[in-house]
Amino acid sequence: MTASIGRRGALAVTAALAVVVGVAGCQSDGGGKKDAAGAATPKASQQSGGDAVAAVQAVYKKTSGAKSAKARMTMTVPVPESTAGVQGASMSIQANGVVGWKPTALDMTMTMKASGAAADGLQMHEIMSGTTMYMNMGKLTAKQLGGKPWLKYDLADLAQVTGNKSQADLFSGSMNRSQDPAQQLGLLLKSPHIKDEGTQQVDGVKAHHYAASLTLDDITANASKAAGLSAKESAQIAGQLKKQGLTSEHIDLWVDQENYPVRAKMAMQVTAGAMTVDLHYSDYSDQAPKIQVPPASKTTDAMAAMKQAQAQGSAL
């Protein structure tokens, strides 16, 4: 292939989307927590915080037996004014597919919506198996990648893609561990105030609603532990998040009568605006999903392509 500005741009765009969607996936698993909810669960005014914690802990035990689920996600992220040209702009990503966590796996199709932007209506296909991620953005990148539609990343390469080892370790560790909703229950349990919001209908089923808020310290501590970051790296991540204006995260969780989450919603406020991740889960299984990765003949190794482009003197 011939290295070009187009190719370097394609690599950069796909890398950025991989990180954005991946982080959302991490957080979504965190939201995919389960709760011992049902018709017999006391109403919000009757249930103490301790009872709510006990309920979440009970769901942790139930969730540990599952290995995969179908997922439908809508993620909305703010677009900085310097990028969008206007204040208050946002971009949304809608995704459908299956996620697995024993082992880590993901297969989702996505559609981006960004009014007035080149990416508006862009469709993507993301596959993840173990620590390897594949992104297919169709015609946007296939031409620049020599006709090969799939771009392949290994999470170990993210430090080079992002230029920030701490952020790469955070993302890599979170993706490896937080695909499992049971493991992420610890994040919800970190909140000292888990509230029982009563029973509601979600996707046609009766579900119990729990809510909690997490501080920046809670978010950083749990994410850093999952990624195996040092105290220094954790402090750097906390500083970066603080600069972005993040101070807390609010989590809403709806659990069906079988103690499986049917919906999870996370909301964060940063300087650029509000970020939300809204997930709907169904069809939990004790079997790992069957993920078919793209053949090598249809795949471009992202790091090899970037190094080749750099060697030939191309600029992004």
Image: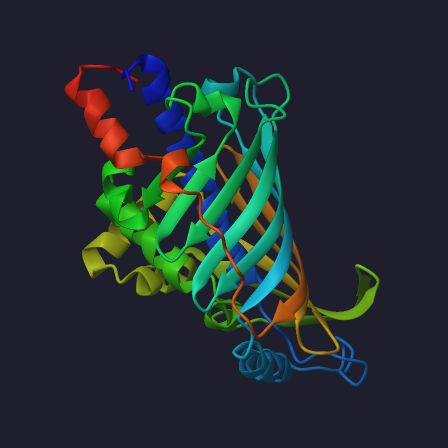
Q: Residue at x 43, y 61 (%)?
A: 104
> Looking at the picture, how far across and down is residue 145, in whole percent?
37, 24
Q: Quadrant of residue 273?
A: top right
Q: Quadrant of residue 242?
A: top left
**110 to 277, vertically: above or below:** above
Quadrant in which the C terminus appears: top left
Q: Is residue 194 left or right of residue 166?
A: right
**255 to 297, vertically: above or below:** below
Near-viewer residue (74 or 239):
74
**258 to 158, vertically: above or below:** below
Q: Is residue 45 left or right of residue 214?
A: right
Q: Residue at x 63, y 59 (%)?
A: 70
Near-viewer residue (39 or 213):
39
Quadrant in which the N terminus appears: top left
> Looking at the picture, how far across and down is residue 292, in whole percent?
49, 52
> Looking at the picture, how far across and down is residue 162, in whole percent?
29, 37
Q: Residue at x 35, y 20 (%)?
A: 7
